[in-house]
Image: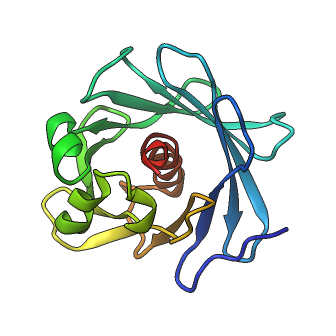
Amino acid sequence: MPIKAKPGEQYTIRRKVLKIFGAAFHIYDENGSLVGYCKQKAFKLKEDIRLYTDESMADPLLTLAARSIIDFGATYDITMPDGTQVGSLRRKGLKSTFLKDEWVIFDDQGTEIGMLKEKNLLMAILRRGNASAFFPQRFEFFKTGSDEPVAAIRQHFNIFVYRLGLSILKDDEDLDELLLLGATCLIAAIEGRQS
């Protein structure tokens, strides 16, 4: 069954239901067509998330891999199938654990190019309890030095199925769609465990 994106959203990431080990997500474009499949490997000491063109997993698009085993401020490298670095994201550990989730975004050279910030402090604090499904997350991507968002991630309210929408608000040469899509899959895998 296709999932149509909400108005203004270019992609919808939906957790696969009844997946026992690891996590898997289907990625739909704004027309409801399946454009990707994201799989988080189970029983790995270091986080390993793969993005493919479809569920056959024949054509890989991206790899998202943690640099360290357990780290509250972990850095995740986003690479193409040939090993070319697309960028990386580093979670702001203590702040993300106790207040709002924040991620620093780096380009392929390791230069900070932006931030991914949870939008609402009160909602973030309420999510820290067992009622996270009732307080959906909202993130915004900001380019370094700007307070105007270039993209947004919104968790759809649904207590049964975890779903995120990605809206690209304006084109930016530093934040390409693959980096934004990779970051959204990372949020779905990492933050989705709180739901």
Image position of 178 (left or right of 107): right
Image position of 39 (left or right of 191): right
On the image, the x and y values in percent for residue 91 come to 27, 38
The answer to which quarter of the image holds residue 149 is bottom left
Q: Is residue 19 visible?
A: yes
State the residue at coordinates (62%, 23%).
Answer: 42
State the residue at coordinates (79%, 36%).
Answer: 59
How many numbered badges does the structure rendering display?
A: 0
Residue lying furthest bottom in this view? Answer: 7
Q: Is residue 118 visible?
A: no
Residue lying furthest front in this view? Answer: 130
From this view, report whether residue 87 is shown above or below residue 25. above
From this view, report whether residue 105 is shown above or below residue 67. below
On the image, the x and y values in percent for residue 58 come to 84, 33
State the residue at coordinates (38%, 63%).
Answer: 137
Which one is in front, 110 or 91?
Answer: 91
From this view, report whether residue 167 is shown above or below residue 128. below
Which one is in front, 104 or 87?
Answer: 104
On the image, the x and y values in percent for residue 19 come to 72, 39
Image position of 169 (left or right of 128): right
The answer to which quarter of the image holds residue 66 is top left
Question: How are the residues colored?
Answer: rainbow
Which one is in front, 38 or 44?
Answer: 44
State the residue at coordinates (51%, 72%).
Answer: 157
Image position of 160 (left or right of 134): right
On the image, the x and y values in percent for residue 17 come to 72, 50
Q: Quadrant of the N terminus?
A: bottom right
